[in-house]
Amino acid sequence: MLAVSDAIEALIDKHGPDALCRVLGTMLTPERIARIDAVLAARLTSVTTAVEDTYDPHNAAATIRTTEAFGLQDLHVIEPHARFSAAKGVTRGAHRWIDLHRWPSAEQAAAHLRERGFRVFATLPDATFSIEDVDVSRPIAVLFGNEHEGLSPAAIAACDGSVTVPMFGFTESYNLSVTVGLAMSRLAARRRAYIGAPGDLDPTRLARLRARWFALRIRGVVGVVERALG
Ligand SMILES: C[S@@+](CC[C@H](N)C(=O)[O-])C[C@H]1O[C@@H](n2cnc3c(N)ncnc32)[C@H](O)[C@@H]1O
């Protein structure tokens, strides 16, 4: 049996997002639809988070939750050793609304992002270049490292540069999920100011996401759609 998310994607492929939204929209309140549309309008794809080899499920879950709450649609997970498993209860369902991309190596993740026009940055507590000075006129991807060792040398080498989130105390580094929050909050705000809009979803992706989010709100959605559209 397909997972619900795969079954929903199959429905979108089969019927198209607009037909799905027409059918499912009749089962949602206008307030629910307005909320989905407001979140879609603020979805940012040109700022993205990547985490390498994180081992603490609470950090993984907090990263998902923070990424979604900031309106970032994509989260890249590099898993050379540890499987990225998010602690149940900590994501508060946030994982359903974003796209999680899994990579076996940082090189592959960085190459994929660079091909799509991203500049890719490693985060290092002792880097000299501040996150505040990152050029936001281009799409930006930021890699975060493991709780103990930080980013692997291969991941750092795969990036275009490294950045620090400034610290002023005796502590040598922030907690991983705190760093994700601090860095991505600033970059998302600066990128939104630069593009002059809260979001940047292209129309095709927006239509598919709208259909997915409508479907996620409806119990037994596969049966509902098959009865209405065959
Ligand atoms: C607990 S830290 C790992 C510390 C590790 N000893 C190191 O030197 O990278 C986990 C991750 O948080 C991020 N991080 C923590 N503090 C940071 C800072 N001040 N600037 C940039 N990244 C930081 C990095 O991605 C790091 O790999």
Image: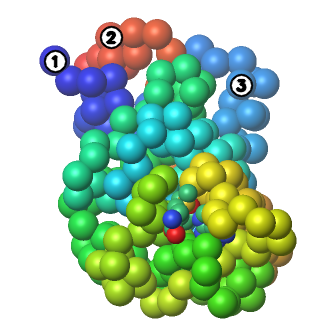
Image-based side of 175 in relation to 112, left or right: right
Q: Which residue is mark 1?
A: 1
Disc 1 or disc 2, which is closer to the eye?
Answer: 1
Query: Few, some or many C-alpha atoms within 10 Å of disc 1 (few <14, some 14-19, many ≥20)?
Result: few
Q: Which residue is mark 2?
A: 223
Q: Quadrant of ligand 1?
A: bottom right
Q: CA distance from mark 3 to mark 1?
A: 29 Å
Q: Residue at x 24, y 67 (%)?
A: 105
Identify the element where label 2 is drawn: helix
**Residue 132 coordinates in the image, percent (x, y):** 77, 81
Q: CA distance from mark 1 to mark 2?
A: 14 Å
**Residue 214 coordinates in the image, percent (x, y):** 54, 29
Q: Which residue is mark 3?
A: 32
Identify the element where label 1 is drawn: loop
Does label 3 point to a residue whose CB lies under 8 Å from ligand 1?
A: no
- Quarter of the image with the C terminus is top left
Query: Few, some or many C-alpha atoms within 10 Å of disc 2 (few <14, some 14-19, many ≥20)?
Result: few
Q: CA distance from mark 2 to mark 3?
A: 21 Å
Amino acid at dot 2 = Gly
Instruction: Name which of mark 2 and mark 3 comes first in the sequence.
Output: 3
Identify the element where label 3 is drawn: helix
Does label 2 point to a residue whose CB lies under 8 Å from ligand 1?
A: no
Residue 140 sits in quarter? bottom right
Single out the residue that lies furthest toward the front.
Answer: 170
In contact (CB < 8 Å): disc 3 and disc 1: no
